[in-house]
């Protein structure tokens, strides 16, 4: 089982409008809602790849109840995009709801998609205030779950009330339990978390620059590693990924630049890296999977889902270049 | 008891953002949620004026449950604005929840308020599909409620599944029961509803122009009356209201033009007209109340609430001019 932790879960709403005009009134033409927050997105991709997954973090109030109900219903019905070549529908592995119930109401996020241009305007509610007792309950649940976990991903922002060193604490507990841990967050929680020596971090260019002060990818990625992460995979958008690891340094590049919605591409990359680790793949193969999943997510018509046919077609075409200089 | 009917209820969310930038990501800085839909807004103002009120219409799904929970909690704690001159806090009269439960999920509306400019961008979800059986249940509930009602207001748009002649049907039932009925809607449901001869309609300038083809207030208001409404009160925004009734024609004007958020001003006007009717006030006094409440709603910092101190100060200063020509 792969465990993902989402301390600041969300109910993600998508509103389609014919055209977004500030200060006007809009009739929403189409809408969807689904469980969100980075760790839940990672779990959805892991599940689609056939990995049994458990999700923990916080959920509460009426919005939390809707989120959990949608999580229990599982993935939406597979469409043509997700059929394998022989026409069979791949079965998604189960996602176990191990969320901790809190008194506060889970936040909503709203993506307003302008159907004329495809551009998205994002509105994110603040998360609920989490109490000290609720954090203690999460720690207990997390330690139990670690005993059955092959790997764990710690994902996203911290809700109000959670101390900035929370991820560092979760990283240390995973290391004590001997479970490989990937940390995907930003800002001060990332800085503190790295110092606790996670196995892997997956910053994007902005997060890396904020952490290290450098926008030169190789320099910044090496600097991030020196701060405590055993491995660093920097996601560089259309330029692919740069991995600086104890085993070597690799640059992975998508076969072509693609147009689409980058929402969730980073979460798909995390799912690719984590599933590759659990399956014992080599670094080049993990990176191929992460880049192909990430690109297939940009190409998907539904934000955050990946286009399985595109994924399978892209996978063998991801370019891998090994840097011969030392990590 | 005054009854209000809201076939397309909504959970109204207000999101404050520092500045709304299309295609950017926004952290919501402040938010509130409350029961919405025109008839619920009218009921809230009637309750604040001390009138016992019942609300019916449709509510369902998790959003409907939140709406009803907020309705049960009642009005938010009174603030300084709502104290009377002697410092006492007026007690709001109870609002009875007589909503009919439906299978569909009640819609949300989102008002995104740009805190830099005060401008509002509105996003309205479509309402849930209402079935024929649910409409039949509403008719039964409505007829029961009419037996105890002093007046009824039929407010707002129709959800999917409800036939365009629905308001005409509700107007006829009220007239059969001998209960004065005010219709506040627009488009084809207004056109059909007027033909059933409601006691009063309260169109704004746009609704009136859509109905009659004329933007000349007196001509359009008289035309609307000829179509079947016994009385027509046209709300003309900053120009006040024009009433064409069996008893005469009056123009009511606010003492000064005011700046603020006009959301809910029309609903406050409906509450003013309906409470005045039930209390047996003269037409000039009903119009004074409607204009003062409407203006005090524009002045309130919270969209849809009215500023009680402003209301009391404005009330004696509303200008009333009687037209001597026949209605």
Image (spheres, coloured by chain):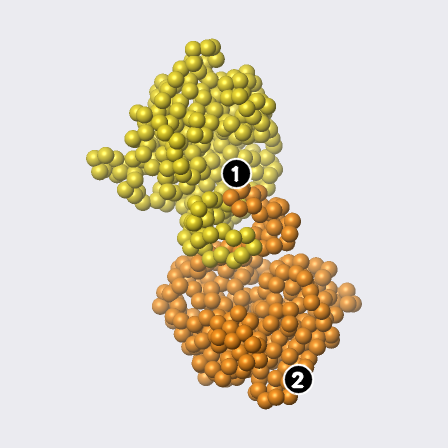
Chain colours: A orange, B yellow
* Residue found 60% across the figure and 28% down from its top: B188
Q: Chain of mark 1?
A: B
Q: Which x, y percent locates residue B112?
A: 48, 48
Using the rendered image of the protein, determine whether residue A140 is visible from the camera's viewpoint. Answer: no
Nearest the camera: B249 or A327?
A: A327
Above/below status of A312 relative to B310: below
Q: Quadrant of residue A21?
A: top right
Above/below status of A295 relative to B215: below
Q: Are marks 1 and 2 on the same chain?
A: no
User: Circle 1 sits in a helix, a strand or a loop, which is it?
Assistant: loop
Above/below status of B9 relative to A81: above
Q: Which x, y percent locates residue A200?
A: 54, 79
* Residue found 66% across the figure and 77% down from its top: A252
Using the rendered image of the protein, determine whether residue B116 is visible from the camera's viewpoint. Answer: yes
* Residue found 72% across the figure and 66% down from its top: A310
Q: Chain of mark 2?
A: A
Nearest the camera: B303 or A23?
A: A23
User: Circle 2 sits in a helix, a strand or a loop, which is it?
Assistant: strand
Residue at numbered disc 2: A322
Q: Which x, y percent locates residue A63?
A: 48, 55
Q: Which x, y percent locates residue B126?
A: 57, 43
Q: Which mark is residue B8?
A: 1
Above/below status of B223 relative to B122: above
Q: CA distance from mark 1 to mark 2?
A: 61 Å
Neighbour class for label 2 at 10 Å: few (<14), some, many (≥20)? few
Left/right of residue A27 with respect to residue A100 in the rendered view:
right
């Amino acid at each position: 089982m792969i465990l993902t932790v989402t301390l600041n879960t969300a109910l993600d709403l998508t509103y389609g409008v014919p055209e977004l005009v500030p200060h006007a009134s809009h009739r929403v033409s189409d809408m969807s809602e689904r469980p969100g927050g980075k760790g839940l997105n990672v779990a959805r991709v892991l599940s689609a790849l056939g990995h049994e997954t458990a999700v923990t973090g916080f959920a509460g109030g009426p919005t939390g109840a809707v989120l959990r109900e949608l999580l229990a219903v599982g993935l939406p019905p597979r469409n043509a995009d997700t059929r394998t070549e022989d026409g069979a529908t791949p079965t998604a592995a189960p996602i176990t709801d191990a969320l901790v119930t809190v008194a506060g109401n889970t936040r909503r996020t709203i993506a307003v998609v302008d159907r004329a241009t495809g551009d998205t305007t994002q509105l994110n509610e603040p998360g609920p205030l989490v109490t000290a007792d609720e954090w203690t309950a999460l720690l207990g649940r997390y330690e139990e779950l670690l005993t059955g976990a092959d790997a764990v991903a710690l994902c996203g922002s911290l809700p109000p009330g959670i101390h900035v060193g929370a991820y560092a604490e979760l990283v240390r507990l995973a290391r004590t339990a001997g479970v490989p841990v990937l940390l995907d967050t930003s800002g001060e929680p990332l800085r503190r978390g790295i110092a606790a020596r996670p196995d892997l971090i997956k910053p994007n260019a902005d997060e890396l620059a904020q952490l290290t002060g450098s926008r030169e990818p190789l320099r910044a990625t090496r600097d991030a590693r020196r701060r405590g992460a055993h491995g660093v995979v920097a996601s560089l958008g259309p330029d692919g990924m740069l991995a600086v690891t104890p085993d070597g340094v690799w640059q992975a590049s998508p076969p072509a630049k693609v147009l689409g919605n980058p929402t969730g591409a980073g979460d798909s990359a995390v799912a690719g890296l984590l599933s590759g680790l659990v399956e014992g793949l080599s670094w080049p193969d993990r990176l191929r999977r992460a880049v192909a999943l990430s690109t297939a997510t940009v190409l998907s018509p539904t934000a955050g889902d990946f286009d399985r046919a595109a994924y399978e077609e892209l996978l063998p075409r991801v370019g891998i270049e090994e840097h011969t200089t030392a990590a």
